[in-house]
Every structure is written in structure tokens, then in C-alpha cells.
Amino acid sequence: MNKLNAYIRIDTMDYLRGFALLGVLLVNSYQVMNNVGVYNEFHDELYSIFNRKFYPILFFLFGFGSYLFMNRSKQKTKNRYLLFLRRIGFLFVLGLIHIFYAPSGINDVLMLYAVLGLFIAMFFKCNKWNNLIVTITLIVLSIVTAFCQPVYGERIVWLELLSNISKWLSLVMLGFTMGQFKFFENIYGKLKYISIFLIVTIFAFPSLFYIQKLIVITPAGHEILEDYIVSSMIISSLLIILQSDKAKVIFSPIKYYGQMSLTNYLAQSVLLIVFSLIIGSVPINSLIICFIIHTILIVFSIIWLRFFNMGPAELLLRYFTYWGKIPNKK
């Protein structure tokens, strides 16, 4: 086997990526369909609940994926920093292409990955405890700056930008640091702590709304706390559920969806363009469109991965990272 492919894939990451893609399309399809005059009340309710909640999962997974890449590259080559820079450079180019063709209402994450990758590269050689301190500091900074926003009226632009950047950086750093702590190794042995954390987040979520009734909280502060709590709740719940073999079988299509997450993320935008054109002559419920796109891409992923080891976009990313031909056929 080629040494560039010789590693054990962590299936849990694929499941998490797959579920994140489900949520991202739920949000993006609502925004795109709204722009072409399609409104669905139930979709509107789901959007208000899950807007901004799945992107934090993607940023977290990017950070963890960066840890895996650097750790595995260390065993294969000495110039791992150059490989990482080529990797995020290609992601940046993909992001530029994606912005060019993506329909209005979609926010690209690939260019953000590339920029955030440059930041975390500075911490690759730092020990896990130092990185944990940096992560906590960034989380606190993002929350404090959000709470400094006015309760009423327009938000202060530089504070909002600082809060968002701190949040994105904290999520990527958290993923990288959890990799250093070997968090995803033997998850079953950590179920007790994950369950306690889940219970805390479940109680924290309604408490946030109760506190808001007692004291005045700036909307920006409420939003960022909600983003952290809900995304943590989703990840914790999935980690617990996926310890069941039956659950893994039931959700196996989501795993294939996540295994080709880069390809499917780009393909979602293409299909949204197609359906936004179709909808002009054939009225279709926006939630049905979301379901159809998921079905198409999941079926495509399952069939593709029967014959190949990785998706088309993932193969291109590997090629430009290592500047070499990567065996892909099974």
C-alpha cells in the first residue's frame, strides 16, 4: 500500500462531518430558496434553531484534521510544514472558485480554513497544555467581546469582527488541542465524562433563556453562548450515540457522506443552483429540495466509495498536497 494512504481512518470523524453537512445544507438551502422567492414556514423554524450551529462543528473538525495531518506527516516526511501550507493553499483556491459559482446566501468556509490554518500552524510545536490555555483564552475573548455589544441598535463592527474571529480560532484550536490530548482515541472509555458534559449543556441551554428573562443580555452575547452550547450538545450526543454498533449501521450512509465531505460541500452549491433554476417553472417545497439534494449526494457517495478510496475533490487535495499520484481505485 502507498505510504500516503497507509493510515487508520477515524470513522467517528466521518459521521460528524456527515451530520454537519446535513445541517449546513439545511441552513444554506433556506437562504438560497428565500432569495428566489420560496418560503416554507417549517423550514423557517428549523433555520432559526440551527442557523450558525453546524459551522462550529466544521471548524472543530478542521482543527482536529490538521492535528491528524501534521502528526501523520511527521511519520512520512520531514517537510510537513510545506505540505500543510500547500494543503491550505489549495483549500484557499477551492474557496475562491466556490465563491465564484456559489449562489447568493452561501458563506464559504474553505477560504476561512486556509486563513485559520496559518494561525494554528504557529502552535503545532507547542505542548497541549499551552494550546489549551490559548483555546480557553480565545473562547473567553469571543464571549466578552460579544457581551460588549450594545443591547439595542446597530452592533459595533470591530467588536463583532473580533468576536467572530476569536470564535473561529477557538474552535479550530479546540479541535487541534483535543487531538493532542488523544480525545478521540478510546471514546468508549470517556463516555462517563462526555455524558456529564452533555447533561451540563442540556441544562445550560434552557437556563440561557431563563436568565435572559431576568436580566438584560445583549443579543450578540446570547447568540455566541447559544452557538457554543448547541454545537457542543450536538457533538456530545453524536459521540454517545455512535458507540452503539446498531447506530453506526443505521447512520452508515451519513458516514459515506462525511467521508467525501469536501466533494459534497462543493456539490451542494452546484445542486442548489440547479434547483433554484428549476423552481422558477416547477414550484417545490424548500425542505423537499434539501432532502432531494441530500439523497442524491449520499447515494453518489455510497456508489463512488465502492470503487474508490476517496472523493474527487479529496483526491485533488491529496495530489496538490504531496505533488504525487495517489492510488485511488480499490
Image (spheres, rainbow, N blue to C red):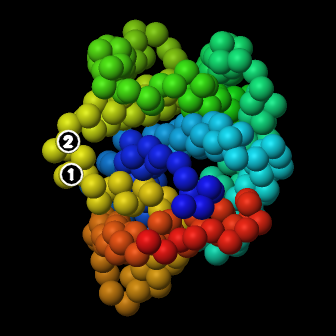
Q: Is any atom of residue 69 visible in this view?
A: yes
Identified at 36% across, 72% down, the residue is 306
Residue sitting at the far front? 1
- Proximity of marks 1 and 2: CB atoms separated by less than 8 Å: yes
Observer-nearest residue: 190 or 18?
190
Q: How far across and how far down the image is residue 320, in percent?
A: 74, 65
Identified at 39% across, 60% down, the residue is 257
Q: Quadrant of residue 315?
A: bottom right
Location of mark 1 (residue): 249
Observer-nearest residue: 297 or 287?
297
Q: How far across and how far down the image is residue 107, in percent?
A: 61, 56
Q: How far across and how far down the image is residue 131, in percent?
A: 69, 19
Q: Is any atom of residue 48 visible in this view?
A: no
Which quadrant, please, contains the N terminus? bottom right
**Residue 164, label in figure:** none
Observer-nearest residue: 9 or 262?
9
Specify few, some or many for label 2: CA neighbours under 10 Å numbering under 14, 14-19, or 20 or more: few
Identified at 77% across, 51% down, the residue is 83
Q: Identify the amino acid type marked 2.
A: Asp
> What kind of element bears circle 2?
helix
Apparent side of residue 299 relative to residue 182 in the rendered image (left or right): left
Which quadrant, please, contains the C terminus? bottom left
> What kind of element bears circle 1?
helix
Vertical comparison of 124 with 299: above or below: above
Location of mark 2 (residue): 245
